[in-house]
Image (spheres, rainbow, N blue to C red):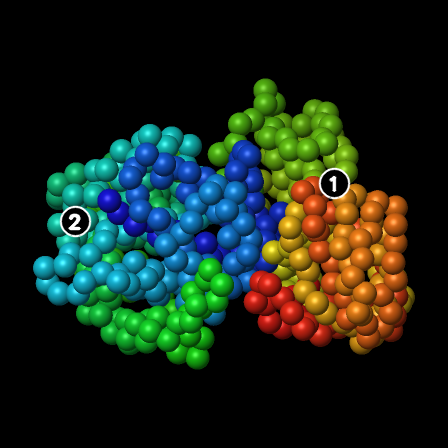
Amino acid sequence: MFTPVILTGGAGTRLWPLSRELYPKQLLALTGAHTLLQQTVLRLEGLGAAAPVIVCNEAHRFLVAEQLRELQVAPRATLLEPCGRNTAPAIALAAHAALKGVAAGAKAAGPVLLVLPADHLIRDTPAFQQAVHAAVGTAQAGQLVTFGVVASRAETGYGYIQRGAASGEGFRIARFVEKPNQERAQEFLQSGDYYWNSGMFMFRARRYLEELESFAPEMARICAAAFRGAKADLDFTRIDAATFEACPADSIDYAVMEKTADAVVVPLKAGWSDVGSWAALHEASEADAHGNVVHGDVLSEDTHGSYLYSQSRLLAAVGLKDHVVIETKDAVLVAPKDRVQDVKQLVERLKELGRSEYSLHREVFRPWGSYDSLENGPRFQVKRIKVKPGATLSLQLHHHHAEHWVVVAGTARITRGEEVFLLEENQSTYIAVGTKHRIENPGTVPLEIIEVQSGSYLGEDDIVRFEDRYGRQGTEG
């Protein structure tokens, strides 16, 4: 048996506007009914794996928890990183979590970890599982395994691993190579000795921590201290922020794998993609007879080799070739397929301009449901609020705006000051400035409310929270 470690950090900026900082690609269903995170969990079925350890950005914690709940998967631990420090520290925290409660000492081998990014696509699950089976014995023997994707083309967007002498079911690693130019990538492909660096690993938890201690002692020390200082928060483990913020940032490749004498690569040929751009997603998706990948309400004429995605309205394309067109409720992206790597620069510009579109969708998801900002103007805003069955918003008040609520689907239990009452469909109520209030969904179907806010200030931070079942702090709605 082994323990999966699923890394769910990352912003996926190259898949903007669908992927946003607070709703990134691993939480999206890009190639089927399940999200990339859920697909990562599901491909472990049948391997006899233990409950996973999840390493999670704090801002995504409830979304991640909900997606695991939908699969009826209870993680061994969900670790909340207070800040991003790359993969080496994240995996160290997971190793400490996997070892919690496990006897120490030379005779106690401890668990084997299978480290998987949550945002990869693997089309051939049996081939993936076969590679995992092949790696287990090598990892149990104390070596550090990475999975090298068998290259299918001269790709310049990935790092490479050069294999050395055979070692068990894999090969010793001769060297890691940064992303090459086209000429070198072609040489790597022709040689047959180079694999794409997948970012997936397998090793014993203690063995990894030993190597981290050898090659990055300050990082190892801080990660151990930050985990010791962790606090339980509902179903999450909140890593000590003051300690962890001082941790150096580095990838596992640089911190450990390029330096250890025990690195092994196991070949993987399983239809792998890191879905790192719209072009990569186009390639990984099923295209029609014209080479187009189409999602949503799309009409096209004389259009070929393109990725066309519509979220909320009709998208019409004429005469396009090798383009990407992505429509969401609040943004539209149009780009030649060979320029989609530059989307990252667009997102940086949005961030510099202080625009919310880099981080938030118009529809914002919360642990109780979501809200969608339909319209706004001077001194007013209209939202559609969706509350999941059994869910409850916090008891709160606002100093600068009032709210009118109209129930359009389901039944709401409303707290307004000292009153508690039910609202049915087509019924409404008014919440005055400064009045404590709460919305609950006591029913078994989703509750939908149209909310009209009016007042001098309508920002999401105009909130004073008194009670909240989700243990949230700050200005979350």
Q: Residue at x 14, y 59 (%)?
A: 108
* Residue 250 horizontal side relative to residue 61, left or right: left
**Disc 2 vs disc 1: which is toward the camera?**
2
Quarter of the view holding residue 420: bottom right
Q: Residue furthest top?
A: 289
What percent of the width, then of the height, locates residue 129? Answer: 30, 35
Nearest to the observer: residue 268 or residue 227: 227
**Going from the N terminus, do you reach mark 2 or mark 1 first?**
2
What percent of the width, then of the height, locates residue 88? Answer: 33, 63
Q: Residue at x 42, y 32 (%)?
A: 123
Disc sitting over residue 312 in the figure? 1
Nearest to the observer: residue 110 or residue 16: 110
Nearest to the observer: residue 153 or residue 387: 387
Q: Where is 445 relative to 16, above or below?
A: above
C-alpha separation, residue under disc 2 versus residue under disc 1: 50 Å
Q: Where is 75 relative to 250, above or below?
A: above
Label 2: how many Cα within 10 Å (few below 14, some 14–19, many 20+)? some
Disc 2 designates what residue?
140
**Residue type beneath disc 1:** Ser
* Residue 136 horizontal side relative to residue 72, left or right: left
Q: Residue at x 26, y 47 (%)?
A: 2
What percent of the width, then of the height, locates residue 206? Answer: 21, 61
Quarter of the view holding residue 400: bottom right
Is residue 187 at all visible to an observer of this figure? no
CB under 8 Å between callouts 2 and 1? no
Disc sitting over residue 135 in the figure? none
